[in-house]
Image (cartoon, helix red, strand yellow):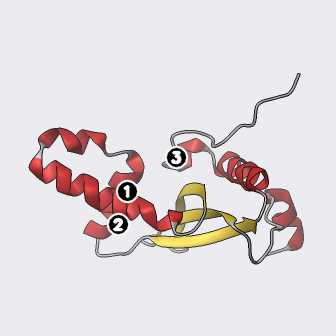
C-alpha cells in the first residue's frame, strides 16, 4: 500500500503490539470486502465466529435467541451458508490502547457505517474542557 494512504488511514503502526485493529472480510467478493472493523487483543478477532456459533445453538433451543443476532452475526452465517470462511486481517498494531481505538474509529469513518455491520463508529474519547 502506498505510504500516503497508510498515513491518511492511520495505519503506520508497529509490526508487533499488544493491541490491534482488525477487519472481518467477506470472501464472496473479489477482492474480499470488509464488513466489520474492531479493536482487540489476543484472539479477539476470532471471537465473533464463536459468538455466532453460541447464538446459533441457542436459537435452535429457543426461538427468541435468533432475535439476538446482530447484522454481523447474520453476515457470518451467510458466508458459512455459501460455503466460505470469514477472512481476518490485522491492519494496525500498537502497544498504546488509545491509539488503537483512534485508528479503529478512523477506519470505521473511512468505510462508513452504512457499508459495515458495526453498530457504532467505535470508541470516541471524551473531550477535555
Separation of disc 1 and disc 2 at Cα? 6 Å
Instruction: Report the residue at 25% width, 39% height from top.
Output: 67
Give x and y (percent) for residue 34.
55, 62
Q: Which mark is residue 8?
A: none
Where disc 3 sits, the SS reads loop
Separation of disc 3 and disc 2 at Cα? 17 Å
Asked whether the beta carbons under mark 1 and mark 2 sit within 8 Å of each other, the answer is yes
Q: Quadrant of the N terminus?
A: bottom right
Front position among marks 3 and 2: 3
Residue at mark 1 = 75
Q: Is residue 66 left or right of residue 41?
A: left
Where disc 2 sits, the SS reads helix
Separation of disc 3 and disc 1 at Cα? 11 Å
Residue at mark 2 = 79
Instruction: Report the residue at 37% width, 56% height from top.
Output: 75
Residue at mark 3 = 118
Q: Quadrant of the C terminus?
A: top right
Instruction: Report the residue at 29% width, 75% height from top.
Output: 83
Amino acid at each position: 500500500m502506498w505510504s500516503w494512504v497508510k498515513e491518511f488511514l492511520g495505519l503506520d503502526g508497529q509490526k508487533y503490539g499488544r493491541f490491534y485493529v482488525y477487519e472481518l472480510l467477506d470472501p464472496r467478493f473479489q477482492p474480499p470486502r470488509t464488513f466489520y472493523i474492531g479493536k482487540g487483543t489476543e484472539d479477539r478477532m476470532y471471537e465473533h465466529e464463536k459468538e455466532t456459533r453460541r447464538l446459533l445453538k441457542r436459537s435452535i433451543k429457543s426461538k427468541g435467541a435468533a432475535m439476538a443476532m446482530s447484522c454481523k452475526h447474520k453476515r457470518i452465517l451467510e458466508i458459512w451458508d455459501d460455503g466460505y470462511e470469514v477472512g481476518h486481517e490485522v491492519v494496525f498494531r500498537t502497544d498504546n490502547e488509545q491509539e488503537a481505538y483512534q485508528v479503529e474509529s478512523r477506519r470505521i469513518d473511512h468505510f462508513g457505517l452504512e457499508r459495515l455491520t458495526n453498530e457504532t463508529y467505535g470508541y470516541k474519547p471524551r473531550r477535555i474542557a
